Amino acid sequence: MTPRPFLRAFVSPAVLCAAALLAALAAVLQYSLRAFVPGALEPGGFTLANFAALAKPLYARVFLDTVWICFITALVALVLGYPLAYALVRARSAAVKAAILVIAVTPLFLGEVVRTYSWIVVLGNNGFVNAMLLKLGLIAQPLQLMFTRFGVVTALVHVTLPVMVIMLAAALAHVDRDCERAAASLGAGPIRTFLTVTLPLSMPGVVAGVTTAFAWTFSAFATPQLIGGGQVNMVSNLVYQLGFASFNFPFAASLSVAGLALTFAVLALLRAAARPLEKIGPH
Amino acid sequence: MPRFSSQRLLRLFGALVVTAVLGFLLLPAIVVALAAFNGRAILSFPPETWSLRWFAKALAYEDFRAGVRNGAIVTAWASVIALAVGAAFAFVLDRYEFRFKRMLETLLLSPLVIAHFTVGLGFLILAAQLGVARGYAVVVACHVVLVLPFVLRSVYVSLRNLDRRLELAAASLGAPPARVLATVTLPLLLPGLVSGWLFAAMLSFNEFTASLFVTVQRTQTLPVVTYNYVREYADPSMAATSVIYIVATAALLTFATIFFGLGKVLNVEQAR
């Protein structure tokens, strides 16, 4: 057995963190199976009633809406993110690279509240877009962009774009350029080279980007809360409302558990669907 | 040459698309800056008068100041703990095989795909069940778990890029493992460690959803305070706060890109 210095000392803190996370998730699971006692913070006995209540059309609808919003957001982020990631990896000038990197990554670190507020200023009835369109005489009345699904998805795409670009760029950076040169030398034009060589080889990044974007969008709270304004509701808004307005923590917990199960199911499906595509990619 | 011109057309088209997407990313920042320097309390584009009064108001607002103080306390603890735990685990992940390695790694990376409201709710319930008062410790623990994947990833990438021969050279000259670690490995890892810590600190300082669940009035961090402000008031103080945020964050990232090769840490540099 080769000596492995530091193994125990370096693994133990990580085990502690993992244990804390597991305990927190177990606490959610446990609460989701307890009865709600109105007026009391302590939950009652064990029951499956919370999960039965999830089937109500009101809640089922929010789940469907959430999945739909997450899909659209991930797809739009992919379409917008791919050219940016490509430019980030392939740009010849180091300054252009650095500029793209900083512009693309900064929103990731701004936090949801700042970004959401900025979009309220852009999309509001007397916000930037409406003021410009009115000034140009293109519209007579302000467009209703706030409290719409369009507004929520626009802001959410902005939130998920950075992580999409990072994942796509990481995959594109590891595409062997000799493969592209080979295709070009055999007479393939740039579009054909891209479609038959570069795009398939970057598929792992596409899968990673779409799945992460989906999960991140599912996690968003401030954006649907403030830009959706009660007209567009996601699971996160429901969980918060049940917890902090009704103090029904058991039901909030069961919504979280269902949300987690749904996220994992969709991620597994996306990965399974992408497996044939990834086969083309590098191993 | 038709081929040549079609390639140029393609390049031009590509540049246009990239500029448009960059514009989309920058648009809210530009608009919020316009709003922040607006002289009046009601938004108007372009502003009729210019002023710095919203910056003065934001900086003097007691709740924001308390949010910054609380955030600094939480971020300082959470980022340092996450850095230590994450760097140590990245080291063993890179070097050793051991039981439950994959499981532990999956578990620690899972906050990337678990909704933050679920993690926040979990720590809230856990604290209640253990009878722990909802002080800073709960917020810090929650933040450590949430930012750990980012530290883990950036230190791991740096470890992969490290030239192991330098460690072997030190060891062959008689340096014990602890000395190799302290005098060779850690200095070589510095860019990854600094970037990892920076990620952890920025993400912790800005973590909102989970913080909303685990903080109480006394421990509210800046994102929670600003969220409450946006819900109550519409004046441009929040725009001024956003501008300060955006400028500080962009400056930090530019600094990280130039001095620590952020592109390398994020693993987005062309391999060949």
Image (cartoon, rainbow, N blue to C red):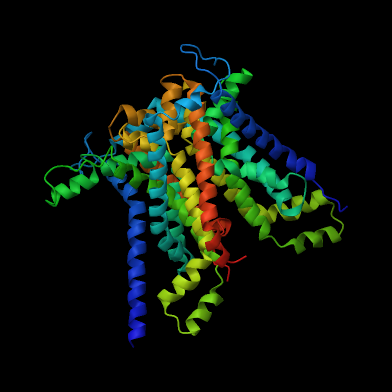
Q: Is residue A102 left or right of residue B76?
A: left
Residue positioned 35% across, 32% down in the render: B58
Q: In this rendered view, identify the residue nearer to me: A26 or B164.
A: A26
The residue at the far top in this view is A39
Q: Can residue A156 be seen in this view?
A: yes
In the rendered image, residue A279, in percent from the top left (x then y), is placed at 57, 64
Q: Is residue B266 placed above or below A148 in the rendered structure?
A: below
The residue at the far bottom in this view is B1
Q: In which quarter of the image is the N terminus of chain B?
A: bottom left
Q: In this view, does B61 lie to the left or right of B253?
A: left
Residue positioned 58% across, 28% down in the render: A29
Q: In which quarter of the image is the C terminus of chain B?
A: bottom right
In the rendered image, residue A140, in percent from the top left (x then y), is placed at 11, 45
Q: In this rendered view, identify the residue nearer to me: B85 or A23.
A: A23
Residue positioned 55% across, 32% down in the render: B74
Q: Can residue B132 be seen in this view?
A: no
Q: Is residue A261 placed above or below B87 in the rendered structure?
A: above
In the rendered image, residue A14, in percent from the top left (x then y), is placed at 69, 40
Residue positioned 81% across, 62% down in the render: B169
Q: Is residue A127 placed above or below B269 in the rendered structure?
A: above
Q: In this view, does B194 lie to the left or right of A227?
A: right
Q: Is residue A128 left or right of residue A97?
A: left
In the rendered image, residue A3, in percent from the top left (x then y), is placed at 86, 51
Figure label count: 0
